[in-house]
Amino acid sequence: MRTPRLFSDQPLLVGTEVVLEGSAAQYLGKVLRARVGDTVILFDGQGQQGTATIKAIAKHSVSAQLDTITTPQTESSLQTHLGLCLSKGDRFDWAIQKATELGVGSISPLYSTRVDFTVPPERLAKRLSHWQHIVTSACEQSGRVRIPTVNAPTSLTHWVSETLADVKLVLHCDVHGTSPLAAKPQSVALLIGPEGGLTDEEVATAERHHFQPWQLGPRILRTETAPVVALSVIGAQWGDMAQ
């Protein structure tokens, strides 16, 4: 059986004991039926990973002792910042999960003209926690050791005006080209619209802040498909998928 791999927000030091609670403990104890003596892989979300031996299993917690610590090279040297307009249902959740698997560094949920809802202030903390759980789980599955930041929702206009990157791209269906720049950048910002796409005014606003319009082939992609395709192309051209 594959060794379980879980996130821990506690410091990882050889010889110390880590106590896993909540969903992590439930997953080990009730889903996997882990036993004392079993091995688990833990990572801290900041670049470190360690193997640990389970020492105790209680009703709501699992204790494990760290045996080794490593710094796996599973993160891309290319920093990618995704500005993704919000969408209803599970589309946004699916998109940020796949973006995390593909190595995105940060995710900013965006409001735009064609996003016809907002996250109520009283539900914002819960929604952010939900999104952070999705990207954390994606890191556990994919072998990443750094967890992407999920920022609070903001307006498209604010995001394009504040975002810094060597290359800035906005997906738009009325331009052509699959190679926006030949030289390898250190960072890329990627703007993707909602269902219905971005308005011409929004594209123009992005261009004023040095975003280059970019079209991924002749077909129109769904808002949850576009990040997967775009990040794959960027990763293959400039990131660790090119290695």
Image: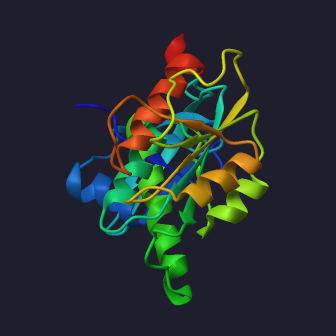
User: Residue 57: in sight, yes or no?
Assistant: no
| Quarter of the figure with the C terminus | top right
Q: Nearer the viewer, residue 84 or 54?
A: 84
Between residue 114 and residue 136, name the one nearer to us.
114
Q: Quadrant of residue 47?
A: top right
On the image, the x and y values in percent for residue 182 come to 66, 15
Q: Is residue 93 left or right of residue 174?
A: left
Which residue extends farthest top?
A: 243
- Rendered residue at 46%/68% (across/down): 114
* Above/below status of 119 relative to 169: below
Q: Nearer the viewer, residue 88 or 97?
A: 88
Of 101 and 42, the residue lying toward us: 101
- Residue 25 screen position, x and y as percent: 37, 59
Residue 139 lies, in percent from the top left, at: 46, 42
Image x and y of residue 90, in percent: 31, 62
Instruction: Name the quadrant of the N terminus.
Output: top left
Q: How is the image coloured?
A: rainbow
Is residue 205 visible in the rendered image? The answer is yes
The residue shown at (49%, 84%) is 123
Residue sitting at x 46%, y 64%: 86
The vertical placement of 120 against 226, above or below, is: below
Left or right of residue 191: residue 227:
left
Q: Residue 229, located in which quarter of the rendered image? A: top left
Check the image and name the residue furthest to the bottom.
122
Please state the total of marks drawn on the protein image: 0
Q: Is residue 234 left or right of residue 63?
A: right
